[in-house]
Image (spheres, rainbow, N blue to C red):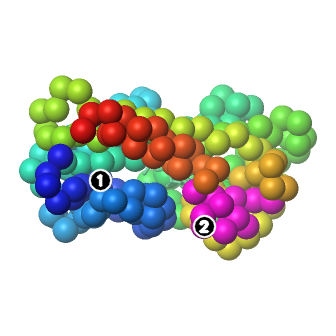
């Protein structure tokens, strides 16, 4: 790691950037756009593969350590869709509302007992483009898919992700509470433990 603890963040997703910066407060996260790093095509078939692709690409262009998040929503009754396609479930460039609308349509008539879902997040930290041992951390957050969107906070599928422990949607949770429960928060805690061991 560099002395300044700067990390290039291989994402242009404003929601992810906000959550990751709050959770990784001891590092200065520089969005990859500042180095003119374009978004790379996510050609992997797993969250891990895609996170490695993104981190390596950002490290290559920026010549700095890079961190990537690949995450998504997994719904068992839909054969694990949208999974790695969560951002583009309703098509390339789809909005959050379009993705949510498609998911609710697919689950139309499915009873609550069969609406189990989880968010999954993989974080990959590559110290340089040829790093043979990237740090890989992951986290999972179990819940269920609501029948209607609820709440205004968060991003992505938060308004339809039911949080059993709090009896509300992820979009109704204050920022800090979501971070303390979420797949991303858990992956970050694991990453921080691994970083401490490595330093
Ligand atoms: P990625 O950029 O391919 O990793 O896209 C991840 C997508 O998964 C996002 O665009 C969201 O649609 C969804 N997603 C990941 N994490 C969250 C979350 O914390 N809340 C809501 N949606 C999420």
Disc 1, SS = loop
| Residue in view at x 44 percent, y 54 percent | 92
Seen from this angle, which residue lies furthest top? Answer: 132
Q: Main secondary structure of the magenta part?
A: helix
In-image side of 183 versus 191 (left or right): right
Q: Is residue 162 above or below residue 22?
A: above
Compute the Cα span from label 2 to label 1.
22 Å
Which image quarter: residue 167?
Answer: bottom right
Q: What is the number of the mark on residue 79?
A: none
Tell me which segment is drawn in magenta. 168-179
- Is label 2 in a helix, a strand or a loop? helix
Determine whether 192 is above or below 136 in the image.
below
- Quadrant housing residue 99: bottom right
Q: Is residue 171 magenta?
A: yes
Q: Which corner quadrant of the image does residue 77 belong to?
A: top right
Q: Position of residue 17 (x, y in %)?
A: 40, 63
Judge whether residue 6 can be spotted in this image. yes
Front-most of residues 187 and 71: 187
Quarter holding the C terminus? top left
Camera-side residue of 39 and 199 = 199
Q: Residue 10 has which mark?
A: 1
Dot 2 or dot 1, earlier in sequence: 1
| Residue at 84%, 35% in the rendered image | 114
* In the image: residue 73, left or right of residue 123: right
Q: Residues within 10 Å of mark 2 (few under 14, many from 20)?
A: some
**Picture mark count:** 2
Residue 99 drawn in magenta: no
């Amino acid at each position: 790691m560099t002395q300044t603890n700067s990390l290039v963040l291989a994402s242009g997703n404003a929601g992810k950037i906000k959550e990751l910066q709050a959770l990784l407060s001891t590092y200065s996260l520089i969005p990859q756009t500042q180095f003119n790093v374009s978004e790379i095509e996510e050609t992997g078939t797993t969250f891990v593969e895609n996170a490695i692709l993104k981190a390596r690409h950002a490290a290559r262009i920026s010549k700095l350590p890079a961190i990537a998040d690949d995450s998504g929503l997994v719904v068992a009754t839909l054969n694990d869709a949208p999974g790695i396609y969560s951002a583009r479930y309703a098509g390339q460039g789809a909005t959050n509302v379009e993705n949510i609308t498609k998911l609710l349509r697919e689950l139309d008539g499915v009873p609550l007992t069969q609406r189990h879902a989880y968010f999954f997040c993989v974080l990959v930290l590559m110290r340089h483009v040829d790093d043979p041992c990237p740090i890989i951390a992951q986290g999972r957050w179990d819940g269920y898919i609501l029948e209607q969107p609820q709440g205004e906070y968060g991003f992505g599928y938060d308004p339809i992700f039911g949080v059993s422990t709090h009896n509300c949607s992820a979009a109704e949770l204050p920022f800090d509470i979501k971070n303390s429960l979420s797949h991303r928060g858990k992956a970050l805690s694991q990453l921080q433990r691994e970083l401490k061991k490595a330093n």
